[in-house]
Image (cartoon, helix red, strand yellow):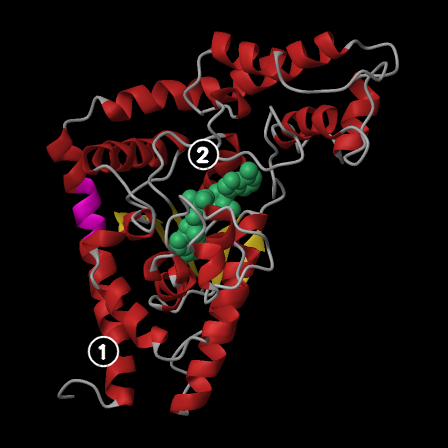
């Protein structure tokens, strides 16, 4: 039996990258699961606070993310859907793992550097880079973010973690940490997980198609939200950055903007075409205008998101008590699984009275 875990930050309504790269593959795993598979999907609010958050916005965004879970088809009867901060064992295991995690390895991870706008060779201990004028200081929580992520996964003896490509580095870290930990305690306490990278592994920004689509981009036209109206979808795609080459052809290097639009369309029609190249060949050609391509892509996105959009509005109209009731019930189940695994780990280490 498989144990599948993944997490997403409470960033409000998810964008197309989150949807195609994570949420939709999670639903597919859920709906194709064997009876003895176990699935857990967590809104990782403890990760969110590695950068400054406004408390009421954080609440709102967690709610919107939970409503999005339900809207895309995650089902609390089939999957455990919960907020990370409702299960204290995540933080406790993180501490335990911190005592085995390598500072050197963490200092080579790219996320804290990009969040602090530092170059990829930046060194966390070099105070001249972090003390640059107006630069925020590197916080311990941001630096050790991957240790919490490893705890999320290892806490449940997860066998498979479905994510987009940007998480691959964190998962490699989790795997290595599990191996190191097992080695030092002489027991297979932790399970090194397998990564499942989704076919839509890196959906690119509409405004800057050489960067990934991201919640933190200040330009709202760079991303499509799964609740965007037909008009919004059309407008954002109409102004998406493309190029001045005639006609439609697929080449991610030379035509990143056009290829991103073709990719997006392909990911909604993976059953009908063998590849984005083939979709481009079959539906478009040297005579197709980019305007016509954009119309077609926008129509496809709108058609496929219509149902999600409506389901999201329904889920948001749930009362707060009803929604938190569902999330807490799942969290109780997660708590039971987590406490039992954590107890075994602690006992092996000589912690606690057992
Ligand atoms: P987060 O919240 O940034 O993203 C959630 C999921 O969406 C995927 N994703 C994308 N996929 C394709 N194209 C994009 N442009 C794109 N943008 C985001 C991400 O790869 C991810 O799968 N650290 C994680 C959350 C986390 C987690 C975990 C994940 C915490 N603990 C344990 C897996 C297992 C994060 O910040 O994801």
Residue at 44% of width from left, 25% of height from top?
A: 226
Residue 188: image quadrant is: bottom left
- Above or below, 328 against 302 in this view is below
Camera-side residue of 265 and 105? 105
- In this picture, is 1 found above or below 200? below
Q: Can you tell which mark lies on residue 215?
A: 2
Describe the element under mark 2 as helix, strand or loop.
Answer: loop
Q: Position of residue 350 (x, y in %)?
A: 23, 90
Image disc number at residue 166:
none
Residue 167 position, x and y percent, is 52, 53
Compare residues 299 and 15 and report the one nearer the observer.
15
Secondary structure predominantly adopted by residues drawn in magenta? helix
Residue for point 25% across, 24% down: 316
Which one is nearer the viewer's eye here, 233 or 336? 233
Q: What crowding class fits label 2: few (fewer than 14 Cα within 10 Å), some (14-19), or many (20 or more)?
A: many
Give the magenta part as a residue range.
326-331
- Report whether 245 appears left or right of 212: right
């Amino acid at each position: 039996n498989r144990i599948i875990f993944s997490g997403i930050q409470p960033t409000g309504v998810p964008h197309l990258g989150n949807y195609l790269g994570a949420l939709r593959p999670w639903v597919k795993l859920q709906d194709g699961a064997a009876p003895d598979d176990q699935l857990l999907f967590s809104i990782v609010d403890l990760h969110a606070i590695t950068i400054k958050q406004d408390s009421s916005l954080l609440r709102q965004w967690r709610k919107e993310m939970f409503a999005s879970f339900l809207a895309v088809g995650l089902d609390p009867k089939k999957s455990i859907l919960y907020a990370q901060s409702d299960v204290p064992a995540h933080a406790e295991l993180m501490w335990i793992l911190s005592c085995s995690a390598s500072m050197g390895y963490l200092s080579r991870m790219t996320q804290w550097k990009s969040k602090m706008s530092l170059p990829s060779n930046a060194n966390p201990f070099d105070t001249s880079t972090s003390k640059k004028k107006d630069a925020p200081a590197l916080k311990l929580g941001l630096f050790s973010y991957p240790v919490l992520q490893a705890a999320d996964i290892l806490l449940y003896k997860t066998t498979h973690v479905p994510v987009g490509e940007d998480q691959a580095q964190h998962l490699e870290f989790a795997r290595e940490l599990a191996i190191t930990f097992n080695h030092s305690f002489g027991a297979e306490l932790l399970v090194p997980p397998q990564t499942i990278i989704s076919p839509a592994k890196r959906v690119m920004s509409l405004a800057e198609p050489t960067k990934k689509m991201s919640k933190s981009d200040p330009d709202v036209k760079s991303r499509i939200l799964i609740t965007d109206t037909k008009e919004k979808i059309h407008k954002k795609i109409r102004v998406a950055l493309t190029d001045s080459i005639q006609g439609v052809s697929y080449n991610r290097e030379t035509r990143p903007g056009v290829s991103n639009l073709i990719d997006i369309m392909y990911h909604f029609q993976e059953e009908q075409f063998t590849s984005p190249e083939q979709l481009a060949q079959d539906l478009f050609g040297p005579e197709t205008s980019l305007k016509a391509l954009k119309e077609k892509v926008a129509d496809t996105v709108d058609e496929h998101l219509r149902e999600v959009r409506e389901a999201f509005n329904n889920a948001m109209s749930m009362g707060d008590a009803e929604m938190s009731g569902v999330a807490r019930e799942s969290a109780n189940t997660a708590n039971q699984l987590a406490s039992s695994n954590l107890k075994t780990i602690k006992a092996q280490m000589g912690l606690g009275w057992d």
